[in-house]
Image: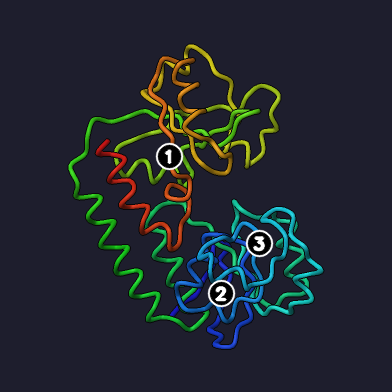
Amino acid sequence: MSLIDALGQPHRPDPNARIVSLVPSITEMLCDFGLAGRLVGRTGFCIHPKDVVRDIAKVGGTKDVNLDRIRALAPTHVVVNIDENEKPTADLLAGFVPHVIVTHPQQPEDNLALARLLGGVFCVEEAARRWSDAFAAGLAALRAMPKGPPQRVLYCIWQDPWMTVSRDTYIAAMLAEIGWSVPAMAPATGQDHGAGAARYPRFDWSDALVADIDQVLLSTEPYRFTEAHADALEKQLGKPVQLVDGEMMSWYGSRALAGLSYLRALAGG
């Protein structure tokens, strides 16, 4: 079986791997695959499953990784993600960790390849296969569901400054499964036009933007939007504003399976 990561790097099965995961959603998936005993490190944002990860050493955040702490844990594998982690950090890790596995799911079906990669490298193929079968069935059920009227939605992930998601993100692909689309968005004036700005641009509210959307979705992460934020913004804009569970919308891996059901409920109102 070919085990190729998001950068095209080949990996081999290792039943004795010592793993550090710098990706919260993947930490959860590894635990669900029965690999908690081989996880020697995780970020402070790796919070699921709560009763399991509390016994796994923290190595900083997804962006501010403690390299010395990781070095002391002597992992054979570190799992990173192109959106979650900084490339310079991954490059430094590659200098002393034998295997850096790079992930980058961009649409729901990419979860199947992710499960196959992790299951194969860490020799838990059967657990990965069972999860993949359940996910494939859930995705097929979602796609077979009658679609409602198309919706143009602005999915907000931050305020001060306001930030949203572009059409080539995992979140936008999840929304597309229920016929909802996000507007094309140029980065706000003065913003650095790097890759991150293109995928998660800042924006300014304008009459034209509000007129171009049917509703606003406020995500509960990474910014902790609440119902109070949603109520205040709805009064300000005169458009429907809905609070949505950011984990259900943006976490690939294990939580993506529950995310399919969440999408069905969201589409049903």
Q: Residue at x 48, y 56 (%)?
A: 105
Give the structural element (helix, strand or loop) at label 3: loop
Quarter the N terminus occupies: bottom left
The secondary structure type at the circle numbered 2 is loop
What numbered label is drawn on residue 10?
Answer: 2
Residue 165 percent location from the top left of the image:
51, 37
Q: What label sits on residue 43 in the rendered view?
A: 3
Residue 143 x, y percent position in the rendering: 24, 49
Kindly identify the amino acid type of the residue bearing the numbered disc 3. Answer: Thr
Q: CA distance from mark 3 to mark 2?
A: 25 Å
Left or right placement of residue 180 versus residue 119 in this view: left
- Element assignment for label 1: strand
Left or right: 62 in relation to 175: right
Who's the residue at 28% across and 44% down the image? 265
Occupied quadrant, residue 192? top right
Disc on res. 244: 1
Residue that protrudes farthest toward the top in the picture: 207
In the displayed structure, would residue 144 be above or below residue 59?
above
Viewer-nearest residue: 24 or 88: 24
